Image (spheres, rainbow, N blue to C red):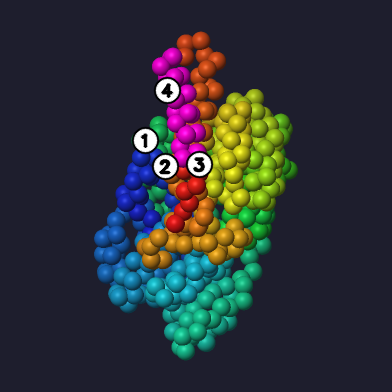
Amino acid sequence: MDILLTHGYFLYEDPKELQIMKPYPPLGILYICSHLRQKGLQAEVFDSTFSSRQDLWNFLKEGPPSILGIYANLMTRPNVVEILRVAKDLGWQTVVGGPEPSAYVQEYLAAGADVVVIGEGEITLEELVPALQSHALDKLRNIDGIAFQAPDGSVVRTKPREQIKDIDAQPWPARELIDMSRYVEVWRTHHGMGSVSLITARGCPYHCKWCSHEVFGKTHRRRKPVSVADELEWLINRYQPQMAWMADDVFTIHHGWLFQYATELKRRGLKLPFECISRADRLNLQVVETLAEMGCFRVWIGSESGSQRILDAMERGVTVEEVQTAVALCRSVGIQTGMFLMWGYEGEEMSDIEATVEHVKNTDPDIFFTTVAYPIKGTPYFSEVADRVEGLKLWSASSDREFRIRNRHSRQFYKFADKLLRSAVELKRLEPKADADDAQLAALRNGIAEARAGLQATRTEVEA
């Protein structure tokens, strides 16, 4: 074996996911694995999702030690740091990549990584694996898109790796190297529908300040509709799923492509229910009608705020009205909508919170989720608040999600904002119903009053 790839996510250690149980395979490392195999390298995958740390330690101990490549993101950082330590102790050479390591090169090198891969990993690892096997440090300097530590202790960063222009030329993810059927069955067991995932494009060209573009940059590279239809048809025949997740950043970004893809699916008689993410400004009547014909049952939209002032500060490039129109269009053709919302972005005031509450009440998506904004290192948002950012734990035991921003409202304040939002939306939904329960309505009104009082009481409380 030339290289072992893993990702350090252990589902059975994740209490939230154990409640949700909607896992998907790590397509990123499966793409890298299939590329390396196509180039003649012996690449294997240890899929940690349904495994345990001890399973991975045992696998590494069995050896013989080779090269271990680990995908890392902000959620798995503590796990990846531990994997690096164990692997180094057992004699493995170590490489880390993914959306986080390029923002924390020195930290990952100090934690035990021999090389940090910056950007897309396929071609970089194709060149890096032979170089590491030869133990020739001078060869590393000629490989684009990496960082490593020189003998004098300095960190060497090579020039950026050019991105893959023709992603159609890349082989499909090496799903057959993992227990793919288990993912489908977990979905089927817990939700009555087995699900698969696939990617039709790489990158997002938009400029949202809080969003990381560390791997794909601000690009948008599309596969041909026929290629995607081929993969979907193969997935249907191989795993018999009842639905799919289109794992693109913005599935509807290119309308011409979407219409061609829909035509190709119709020609083949393929119609698998699916959900996807879109921007509100990339939805119109023709698009949502096409999505419905293809079998789309839910579109997720990043609304973030009901305040145009905050949306503009984020550089979202959409309006509140566009979000409301997009949700109404989806509803008109029978497509559910999910909405992502963000509290606490820089400059948010009580009036912006109230605007968000009114926005969600009036828009009435089928589902909405909230989060408190957190600055990811490497993003413009992080740069804006960097002088006020503080972590609560050691870097190796935390994540960017745990950053605190001095002088921002307390977490308790945003809990009251959440309570206000959810109570107000539910009351708006129930009030018109003739059979609405009076006690439930009264409880919601009390909840709104309590939330407003809580917001006022905690208005002056700030993060430490």
Is label 1 in contact with label 2 (beta carbons under 8 Å)? yes
Q: In which quarter of the image is the C terminus?
A: bottom left
Magenta-tinted stretch: 437-457
Q: Mark 4 falls on what kind of element? A: helix
Marks 4 and 1, Cα distance to the nearest angstrom?
A: 31 Å
Instruction: Pick whichever, 59 or 2, lies toward us.
Output: 59
> Comparing marks 2 and 3, which lies closer to the viewer?
3
Estimate how packed mark 3 is, as few (under 14), some (14 to 19) or many (20 or more) residues with alpha carbons within 10 Å: some
Q: What residue is pinned by disc 2?
A: 22
**Amino acid type shown at disc 2:** Lys
Helix or strand or loop: what does disc 3 sit on?
A: strand
Contact flag, marks 2 and 4 (Cβ < 8 Å): no
Q: Which of marks 2 and 4 is nearer the N terminus?
A: 2
Q: Nearer the viewer, mark 4 or mark 1?
A: 4
- Three-letter amino acid code at disc 1? His
Can you tell which quarter of the image residue 163 is in?
bottom right
Q: Nearer the viewer, residue 123 or 284?
A: 284
Residue beneath disc 4: 443
Q: Mark 2 vs mark 4: give the one in front.
A: 4
Q: Label 1 vs label 3: CA separation?
A: 24 Å
Q: Which of marks 3 and 4 is nearer the N terminus?
A: 3
Q: Which of marks 2 and 3 is nearer the N terminus?
A: 2
Magenta stretch contains residue 442: yes
Asked if labels 4 and 3 touch by Cβ distance under 8 angstroms, the answer is: no
Residue 320 can be seen in this image: yes
